[in-house]
Structures are given as structure tokens and as C-alpha cells.
């Protein structure tokens, strides 16, 4: 018995496959939407940030924490992080937290440190840092595991397995946040997401949404690595779930972030030789975890930015593949900011898939150059991947960047930043077709869903976006100006402009 087709006239609209955002943090993104936006479009200096936070504090009930996000210190006029003293101007009687654009830390006011018993003599936690000035006084900046003073260590138990940047809210508030984030993804034409850091909290929220029929996007979940043993004990050794909510693999962290200067450069940063960043694991320990996951048939996705961190990941995957050969393991390196040419060749040989975020260098590519010098201009070298035969994926890493695939595609084609600076030589750029594939079918391959998602073919789900123009036909610098008129998931219109 056949179906009666419904014919819809889309006028001059251009239909493309629904965008696949293979690396994003939807719950965190939804949470950030309720915070104060202190990003580059809102503030270009520390006084402007303080003014934004002050205005928000005036509208909040007494004692309610003030939370902002989105600043990138090298994009500010002062070329530095704000300090706790400057945030004390916002409020001295409540918590003030300003999250860095990287999501791996930020700055707090003096009150936040005091109520948590943190002073100049407090030791740094494993996997994090309370930053101090030349006199040993706390500056208010904190990174990764030091954020436990905000999040607690029990709600999101991460330890060395990654940054603790999730703040707990009531379940109903989290569901509202996910709903709000979903609408932003749909507005960008995104129909499928790889949630790249799923803890019990995210898992619980997705199950609640699915049970209530409110899961409008497709979500593939990557459990955070501290849950590896529990996943194996439960027999989660392959993809499971349904067309909307499924388990994809395990997420690891090798090092920190370039934006927060916690990516690992053992010889120090050019911008601050006293900072080296950090590795989350000793190489042998990490290799053991990858071996365990790979032997069980699990896909792994590891955050790694610096050449040293990427070397640890590539070497561990090579060793795991040598022990248990698998021509289609699809191990991923998230961000994969600065691989060496030799590492790229080895990635090609091992089938390792980089999952890049071109909007990172759109928003703060100049900052990477200032932080590490050469080879910062090679940040996310898509052209090199392409020439080496390494299939690459483009994603947003929301909330680190807005889920705007057309902006990400334009940046991949032009390598022009928000400030108008072209990052690196032209051979790092890719064609509009390659960039479009990277945000559709290659994204589907990266989450293991190319059989039913990522392209417009008979037998696949009717996930597509209707655009106002053709990204393959307009001038490269105009791609991001194309509007997403409609977004359809499984043949149902979920967004209309």
C-alpha cells in the first residue's frame, strides 16, 4: 500500500540536505542562551563587559548569580582576561562568573572565591588552575577542573576526563534550555547533532524529551570517557537507539583549548611563555583507554588541539588498530587544530576523521596566531586534509560558536575572519562543494549515519533545508548571507523563516 505524496511548492528555494552538526553541546548552548552575551558583537573591551553584567545584575533578584559568556581575551581592546577586581564592580555580594568563549574556564569575582574558600594558598586541582599574578595573588581567572567551585564535583564527575563546564539547573529548566537550543539549530538548517559530551545529565534530559515527544532533532550521543567502564559493563558496544536518539561512541580529551590557552604546548605560548596548557592523560594511560574502547568496537572522539596532543591521539589509535585491525573504525579527532603534515598523512593511513570548526578561526583566528605564533596561521588546515585524502567534517561546537552552517561553510572557503583577516595561505581553503559536503554527508559519516542521513537520496530520511540561494553558485563571501527559509526533519517542517 503506497503513500499519497504531498506536493509543496518551494518557489525559487534551493533544497540541500539537512546540515549535520557532528560536534556540539546542545544543553550547554541552551544554558548559555539564558546568560549575558559578552561576545565580540556585544563588547570589545573590559569596561563594556562590566557594563553588560552590571545591567543584568540590576534586573536579577538579590543573591542570584550573574553569569556571562563569550569573551575571547585577545579580541578585547586590553588583550587580556578581566580580573576578579574588575568583576567586583558588577557585584560584591553574589557570584559573578564570566565564561571564556572556549568554555574551558573564565573569570570569577572575589565573592565567588571567598565563599568557596579559595585563597592565594589554595593548591591547583588536578586538571585545572586558579591563576595568580606575579605577586601570587589570585587574578580571578580559572580553568577546567578549577571550575568545580562553580559546578561541584558530584553533578558532573569528570576529573581528568575533560573540562567541568556544566552548571546544574533544575530538570525542567534544562528541558526548557534544550528546547530553546533546538530552535536555534533548526533555524540554521541543522537536522542532526552529535552531542560531544554526554553525561548522565544530558542522557536523562534527552530521554525525557524523547518520552514527551519533544525531541525535534536527531541526536547521536558521545558519552564522556569517565563513563567508559560503565558503558562496557552495560554492553553498549555498538550503536543503539532509534532514528532520533542514538548512542554513537565515547568522548575523550587529550588537551585543553587554544582559546583559553590550555591546549598543551610544552615549550610555552609565544603570547605567555609561562603557560604550557595541559594534557589530560599520560600517553600510556590514554593509549590504554583507546585500546579498551577500540577492542570493544566503540568509536572514539578525542578533543586535541596542539601537535603534541594530536601525536598522543594518533599514536594511540595506530597502536589500537595494530592490535585489533578495523578498516572502518572511524576514530575522530575533535577540533584537530594544528596537526603536522606528517600526522595528517598518518591520519589518512589510519582512517582517522578530523571534526573541525571553521567558526573558531572566524571568531578568533588572529588570537591563535598571537598566542602560539607560527604555525597558528594553519589552524584547521582543511586544504591539507583534502590533499592528503583525509575526509573532514565541519561543525559548530555550539555554544563556542553559533550553529550557523552557512557561516562555517563560507569561512572554510574564504578563511577570512570576523575582522577581515585572511588566515594562512590560499591552499588551506577548500571549495564550496567540499565545505557543503563537510557539513552534510561527511558529518553523517562521522556520526555513523550515512546510510539514512546526510544526502538527498531515495531510502534516506526526508531531512533537508530550504535556502534562499545556492551556496555553490553565489560568490564565496556571500554564502553566509543566504537565508534558511525552512528546515524539515523526517518530512515534517520544523522551522520556517
Image (cartoon, helix red, strand yellow):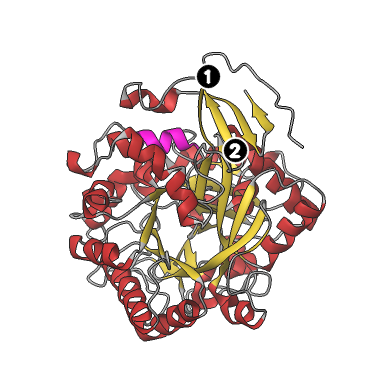
Quarter of the rendering occupied by the N terminus = top right
Q: Which residue is mark 2?
A: 463
Name the residue rendered at 41%, 68% in the picture.
132
Which residue: 36% across, 33% down?
410
Residue 120 image position (x, y, % from top left): 48, 74
Q: Report crowding for label 1: few under 14, some 14 to 19, many 20 or more residues within 10 A (C-alpha).
A: some
Magenta residues? 404-411
User: Does the magenta segment cover residue 37?
Assistant: no
Rendering quarter of residue 108? bottom right
Instruction: State the image quarter where residue 463 is shown.
Output: top right
Quick one: 346 or 404, which is closer to the camera?
346
- Front in this rendered view, residue 286 or 444: 444
Q: Position of residue 255 (x, y in %)?
A: 39, 68
Q: Position of residue 428 (x, y in %)?
A: 22, 44
Answer with the quarter of the image where residue 372 lies: bottom left
Q: Which residue is mark 1?
A: 13
Q: CA distance from mark 2 to mark 1?
A: 15 Å
Q: Residue at x 46, y 77 (%)?
A: 294
The C terminus - image quarter:
top right
Amino acid at each position: 500500500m503506497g503513500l499519497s505524496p504531498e506536493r509543496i511548492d518551494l518557489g525559487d528555494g534551493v533544497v540541500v540536505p539537512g546540515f549535520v552538526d557532528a560536534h556540539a553541546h546542545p544543553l550547554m548552548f541552551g544554558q548559555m542562551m539564558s546568560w549575558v552575551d559578552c561576545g565580540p558583537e556585544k563588547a570589545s573591551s573590559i569596561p563594556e563587559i562590566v557594563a553588560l553584567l552590571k545591567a543584568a545584575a540590576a534586573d536579577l533578584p538579590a543573591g542570584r548569580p550573574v553569569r556571562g559568556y563569550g569573551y575571547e581575551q585577545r579580541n578585547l581592546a586590553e588583550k587580556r582576561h578581566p580580573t576578579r577586581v574588575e568583576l567586583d564592580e558588577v557585584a560584591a555580594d553574589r557570584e559573578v562568573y564570566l565564561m571564556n568563549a572556549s568554555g574551558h574556564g573564565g573569570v570569577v569575582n572575589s565573592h565567588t572565591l571567598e565563599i568557596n574558600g579559595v585563597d592565594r594558598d589554595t593548591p591547583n586541582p588536578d586538571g585545572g588552575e586558579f591563576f595568580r599574578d606575579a605577586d601570587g595573588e589570585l587574578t580571578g581567572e580559572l580553568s577546567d577542573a578549577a571550575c568545580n567551585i562553580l559546578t561541584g564535583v558530584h553533578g558532573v564527575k569528570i576529573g581528568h576526563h575533560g573540562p567541568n563546564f556544566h552548571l546544574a539547573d533544575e530538570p525542567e529548566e534544562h528541558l526548557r534550555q534544550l528546547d530553546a537550543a533546538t530552535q536555534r539549530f533548526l533555524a540554521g538548517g541543522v537536522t542532526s547533532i552529535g552531542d560531544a559530551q554526554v553525561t548522565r545529565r544530558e542522557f536523562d534530559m534527552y530521554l525525557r524529551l524523547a518520552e514527551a515527544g519533544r525531541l525535534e532533532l536527531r541526536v547521536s550521543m558521545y558519552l564522556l570517557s569517565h563513563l567508559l567502564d560503565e558503558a562496557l559493563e552495560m554492553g553498549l558496544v555498538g550503536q543503539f537507539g532509534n532514528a532520533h536518539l542514538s548512542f554513537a561512541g565515547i568522548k575523550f580529551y587529550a588537551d585543553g583549548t587554544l582559546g583559553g590557552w590550555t591546549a598543551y604546548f610544552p615549550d610555552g605560548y609565544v603570547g605567555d611563555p609561562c603557560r604550557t596548557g595541559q594534557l589530560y592523560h599520560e600517553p600510556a594511560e590514554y593509549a590504554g583507554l583507546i585500546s579498551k574502547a577500540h577492542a570493544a568496537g566503540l568509536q572514539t572522539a578525542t578533543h586535541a588541539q596542539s601537535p603534541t596532543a594530536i601525536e598522543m591521539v594518533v599514536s594511540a589509535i595506530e597502536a589500537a588498530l595494530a592490535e585489533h585491525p578495523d578498516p572502518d573504525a572511524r576514530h575522530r579527532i575533535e577540533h584537530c587544530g594544528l596537526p603536522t603534515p606528517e600526522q595528517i598523512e598518518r591520519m589518512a593511513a589510519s582512517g582517522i576523521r578530523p571534526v573541525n570548526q571553521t567558526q573558531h578561526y572566524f571568531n578568533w583566528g588572529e588570537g591563535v596566531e598571537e598566542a602560539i605564533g607560527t604555525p597558528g596561521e594553519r589552524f584547521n588546515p582543511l586544504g591539507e586534509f583534502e590533499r592528503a585524502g583525509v575526509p573532514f567534517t565541519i561543525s559548530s561546537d555550539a555554544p563556542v560558536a553559533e550553529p550557523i552552517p552557512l557561516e562555517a561553510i563560507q569561512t572554510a572557503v574564504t578563511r577570512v575572519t570576523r575582522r577581515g583577516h585572511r588566515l594562512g595561505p590560499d591552499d588551506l581553503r577548500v571549495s564550496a562543494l567540499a565545505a557543503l559536503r563537510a557539513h552534510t554527508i561527511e558529518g553523517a559519516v562521522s556520526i555513523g549515519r550515512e546510510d539514512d542521513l546526510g544526502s538527498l537520496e531515495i531510502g534516506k530520511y526526508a531531512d533537508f533545508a530550504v535556502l534562499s540561494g545556492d551556496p555553490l553558485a553565489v560568490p564565496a563571501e556571500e554564502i553566509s548571507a543566504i537565508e534558511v527559509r525552512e528546515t524539515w526533519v523526517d518530512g515534517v517542517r520544523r522551522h520556517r523563516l
